[in-house]
Image (spheres, grey):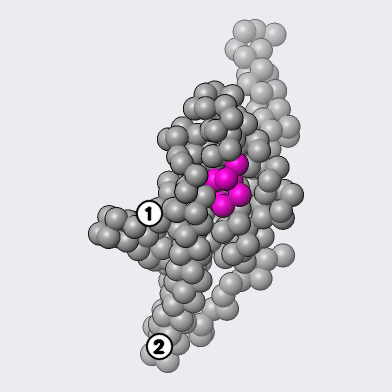
């Protein structure tokens, strides 16, 4: 066996390992419908944009960087287990409190950072409020040396505001898209897929 063949076999073995063991390489996910993509896009713009506007225009402490990841869940999978109000609001609050506690005990150190994230995960598990983006909130508390008000302002108030905006925005964008779909159906206008619109699409779609 020549060197090139050995290299190909090695690359193939690495590919199989990554695919079978690491579960990184898999089938391409099915494409999202046009209406879903518009709902996600405009919902995220409204949610984060309004929080940023409140923070910049009126100096209200309602925006935390980890809310960007929360917005992804709220608008992409609004019915998902991690996107529910309990998970978003309580998860961020518990994580922020854990981060502040870790900062108080360990200071802004490498082990304080690790303890904050680990403690936040356990706290969310114990309270049934698992929300993965909240682990970043705990880390932010340590790295930026937040005070004891951090869990309340901006975290709890900001998370509640984001959740409220998310619920309103999801419903509003949904109604707008359904109205446009009805209008296109009455006019016989071709939908985004190229066919004639047959009416509004049900949302959220059923997940098998």
Please tell me whether residue 129 belongs to the stretch shown in magenta.
Answer: no
Q: CA distance from mark 1 to mark 2?
A: 41 Å
Q: Which residues are magenta?
A: 92-98
Q: Is residue 146 left or right of residue 126?
A: left
Q: Which mark is residue 183?
A: 2
The one of 19 and 81 positioned closer to us in this rendering: 81
Q: Main secondary structure of the magenta part?
A: helix
Q: Is residue 67 visible?
A: no
Residue lying at the far top in this picture: please name it.
Answer: 2
What is the x, y in percent for residue 156?
A: 51, 57
Q: Which mark is residue 182?
A: none
Do residues under tags 1 and 2 come within 8 Å of each other at their CB atoms? no
Residue at the (66%, 38%) spot, across then down: 119
Residue at the (72%, 65%) spot, across then down: 208
Above-or-below relation of 152 to 135: below
Q: Point out the image quarter for the N terminus.
A: top right
The one of 36 and 53 positioned closer to us in this rendering: 53
Pointer 2 local density, CA inside 10 Å: few below 14, some 14–19, many at least 20: some
Residue at the (66%, 23%) spot, across then down: 14
Q: Earlier in the sequence, mark 1 or mark 2?
A: 1
């Amino acid at each position: 066996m020549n060197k090139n063949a050995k290299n190909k076999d090695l690359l193939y073995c690495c590919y199989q390992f990554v695919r079978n063991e690491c579960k990184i390489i898999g089938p391409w996910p099915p494409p999202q419908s046009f209406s879903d993509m518009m709902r996600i896009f405009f919902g995220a713009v409204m949610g984060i944009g309004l929080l940023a506007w409140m923070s910049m225009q009126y100096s209200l402490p309602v925006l935390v960087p980890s809310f960007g990841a929360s917005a992804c869940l709220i608008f992409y999978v609004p019915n998902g287990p991690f996107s529910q109000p309990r998970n978003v609001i309580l998860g961020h609050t518990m994580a922020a409190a854990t981060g502040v506690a870790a900062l108080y005990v360990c200071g802004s150190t490498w082990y304080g950072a690790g303890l904050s994230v680990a403690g936040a995960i356990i706290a969310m598990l114990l309270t049934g409020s698992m929300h993965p983006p909240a682990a970043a909130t705990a880390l932010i508390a340590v790295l930026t040396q937040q005070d004891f008000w951090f869990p309340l302002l901006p975290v709890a108030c900001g998370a509640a505001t984001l959740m409220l905006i998310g619920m309103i925005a999801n419903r509003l964008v949904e109604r707008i898209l359904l109205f446009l779909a009805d209008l296109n159906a009455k006019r016989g206008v071709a939908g985004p897929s190229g066919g004639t619109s047959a009416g509004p699409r049900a949302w959220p779609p059923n997940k098998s």
